[in-house]
Amino acid sequence: MDAACFQVSPMSANSSASAAGYPPPSFIDPATLMQIQSLELRARAVVEGFFTGLHRSPYHGFSVEFTQYRQYVDGDDLRYLDWRLYARSDRYYVKQFEDETNLRCHLLLDNSRSMSYGSLSYSKSDYGKTLAGTIAYFLNTQRDAVGLFRVSETVDEYIPPRFRFGHLRRILVCLDRQPEGTSTGIVAALEHAAQRVRRRGLFLIISDLLAPLDRLESRLAYLRAGGNEVVVFQILDPAEMSFPFEEAALFVDVETGREVYVDPQISRRAYQQRLQEHLAAIRSACGKLGIQLNQLTTETPLERALFDLLQTRMHVTQTRHR
Amino acid sequence: MSFLAPLYLLAGLAISLPIAFHMIRRTPRGRQMFSSLMFLSPSPPRMTKRNRIEDWLLLVLRGLAICLLALAFARPFLRAQESTPDANRESQRLAILLDTSASMRRPGYWEEALSHVREVVAQAGPMDQLTLLTFDTLATEQIGFEDWSRLPVEAREKSVEERLKDLSPGWSGTELGRALISAADRLEEQADLAGEKKTVVLISDMQLGGHWEALDSFTWPADVTLRLKTVGTSAAETNASIQLVSEGQTPGETLRVRLYNTGNSSRESFRLGWQDEFADESPLDAAPGTLTVYVAPGQSRVVPAPMVPEGMSPTSLALSGDDVTFDNLCHVIPREPRKIQIVSLGSDEPASPDGLRFFLGPLFPSTSWRQVEIVDWPASEPAPPVSGESISWLLLGGTPDAAQRDWVRNWGRAGGQVLFVARNADQATTLYELLGTPPQTVAEADLTSYAMLGKVDLSHPALRPFDDARYSDFTKLRFWHYRKFAMETLPGVQVLAAFEDGAPALAEIPLGQGRIVLLASGWNRNDSDLAVWSKFVPLMNGLLDYVFPAPSWRRQAVVGDDVVLSELGLGTERVAVRMGGETTVHAAQDTVRLDRPGRVRFSRSGAAEDAAAVELAVNLPADESRTEPYPPELLAAAGVRLEKLSGGPASKVDLQRQERQLLNRELESRQQYWRWLVVAALGVLGVESILAAWTAWLRREQAVSTA
């Protein structure tokens, strides 16, 4: 997998989607969506809207792949010859593809305090929860097993992946809790998660990744070493990107409560420079490990995040089968 | 440099505020929650050497602005060149207006007023011009501006003092308004001196009955101020007064008097009694004949005078029970009814309504002011039963015999007044014999129905009361019979009323010094409707007043009234006037001013006992007894520019301090340095604002570039 193609910055997400003839012109505005109290309803609204947009789309998801037959030609692998069909129809047909198992997806949601920040009417945590719920809902409709890690410094809560009645609701209820952690990173939690998961699957990490990157790369490497596919959704607030403040004030860290006097007019340029360096470092680490990175701001419509996920998964699957 | 309000200099301490603000480290205004501070570095304002210098400049500017404002509020002024006000003081014109009305006779008032005069005179500068006026109902100049200017400076106070010795409060009322106008006019007389300070110094007790109303119709000069020196304001005194309201309407009725109690009185019970000319001034005791009267403060009450004690010939009513005695006497002269004697010559029965005599009694009734006696002249008597001098009017309604005709003619020529009523044509010819003219025939008017008056001379004094549209209707008067006299046969006749054919109905014919009033028809039933006509009684009484006029003067007068001696009818060229125990002789055409209360007697000069002497009772004007203090603000409301309100005597130190304060205020208002200080402060603040903005911009740019 080419890591470079996943380096979708929030600002460039629109252009990549437009090139694929998608998304439909009408997204659900995140601000409007967040006004829906129930997380399940929010997830359903996103997924159903997504399906409406997929009406004529060739994509079918990444677990249950489309299966077709074609006539055998010389040179085809005999392992894919359908002998039962040959017995019924006395013709050689080849099964072009068939997925073996259901996908096991682990949603890993950052539960730290920094996720509670939001300059809009909702926080990064709200956005991340909705994104996780949407993916869980979508996978549930695909009959895939979905599990959940709520992590801060360590794993706060873990729901193993299942596909059974009531499991989705359990995940959604767990997601709906407020972030309580005080940690500044999820590095330690990644290690715990990697130890808990025995069977390989897909890890969807939803975090702002606003923490020192000392051991992040190694912990992500743990997950990849276990044979897991890893997709990272880095969620940032628009104010964290643009730093729009004008007046000097005491800036208070929501995680630690530390206060620092900052004059934005003086510090804005330095801040943006350091942030871009941090983001670049994350992109670099993900690129090395073959991790799909989606950097989103909380203004981005959720359907687009889902679409980006599907598109990249499709690409991965096709690449793998080739 | 001095300051009018030096306490405002304390506001200069506010200069510490910018210093305090400067010393306090700038703290951020708000707190901003943020997700992570890992990319933020603290950026506190740094104190560099250069910043400190610039801030010090701002600090100096702000401190300077505060100091300038504090100085401006302290109202500075320079007194160096004007520190000797007395030497360079502008000259002023002063008019001292000294009240000499009767209310100033209250104990202590006059002495206090004189001390005020001396104080004002002592304070007058050598260049000042001064006049001293006294006023009661009239303003009198005691010392004029020219007199003052002519006097040596050192002799002025002494001259005023000598003049004051001759002055004392009189008995007249107060005309404050007219006096103020007079004083203001005197100050305004010299137009070339306009611009110098002009002040009227009013020294008065400011009583409520002071009559300031004249000021309402006067425009007070803009450059004349009034300085009040109120006398006796601290005294809260009870003052009741007494005035004669009316004499009785009938001869037996007593007098009625009005008692007035001032609003600031503390008592309300007073005694009222008669006094004769020998009474002392001791208060009335509870002897018989005195009356206790209750009058609430500020109110008046009309009561009948007490009965005159037996064996006493009173001259005045006296009041006691109050603190102020100058207005406690009311001089009274009991009125004597005027005696009128009407002699009737005729054969009519007094009890017969067909004749003239029957109506005389109802026509001329006796009242409280006249006593009418009707005397019948028997037909056989050649002369009336009373002396000719006492006869007021002779009514000739019958046919006199020769002796009677002679008597009447002679009496008339000597000044007697005759009313000739033509009863028939034969009797009417008697008129010519009385007049002494050749006998003429008088014809009876030939009437088929009745005759009316065709012309009435309403300008004649006897008929003037009818000269009004409401009373001038003579059409209801009808004559059944009358006698036609030829006008040309009556020498000097003046027709008062004529019949429709032009014949005289009522005429006046001179007879020597007397006169004959001719009535061409009688008022008996057969001749006319006169007796039942509504205007008959006024007509006849008008004629009586015309032929026997009542005196025009009244027996009750007030101080300040002028008496024209010729109107008293004494008939001499010299008249002796006895007033207050002094007798002066005046020419008959003179006018005498009544200047004190009491009885005034006018008699023919040289006659020891003159029966025709006239005696008047002179009393104080009623308003002079209204001694309640009068609020000076009302003068200001009437347009007078008051300099200040002076109360009791102020100490000399206080006066000097007040004068110094006034001078300071005037100097400051003339210089007005505070305006320039405010302008300077605004300028400094403007520079400070520009400098502060530039400094902030420069600092920000530096910070951005270093960050």
Image (spheres, coloured by chain):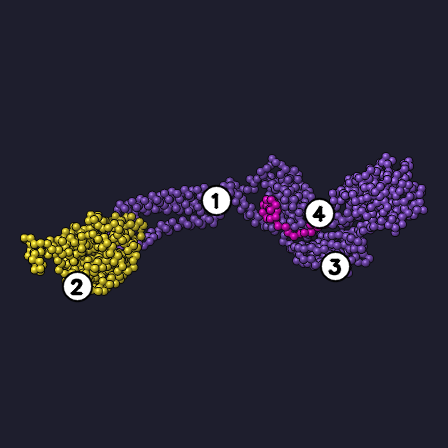
Q: Residue furthest front?
A: A89
Crowding around mark 1 (Cα neighbors within 10 Å: few <14, some 14 to 19, many 20+) is many
N-terminal of the pair, mark 3 or mark 1, is 1
The residue sitting at 84% across, 43% down in the picture is B480
Look at the image and give the colour of chain A: yellow
| Residue pointed to by mark 4 | B172
Return the x and y of residue B160 as percentages of the image width and height: 66, 43
Return the x and y of residue B412 as percentages of the image width and height: 88, 41
Q: Say left or right for A63 vs B407.
A: left
Residue B76's disc is 1
Residue B291's disc is 3
Which residue type does callout 4 highlight? Ser
Spatial CA span between label 3 and label 2: 130 Å
Secondary structure at numbered mark 1: strand
Which chain gets the purple colouring? B
Which residue type does callout 3 highlight? Leu
| Residue pointed to by mark 2 | A196
Which residue type does callout 1 highlight? Pro
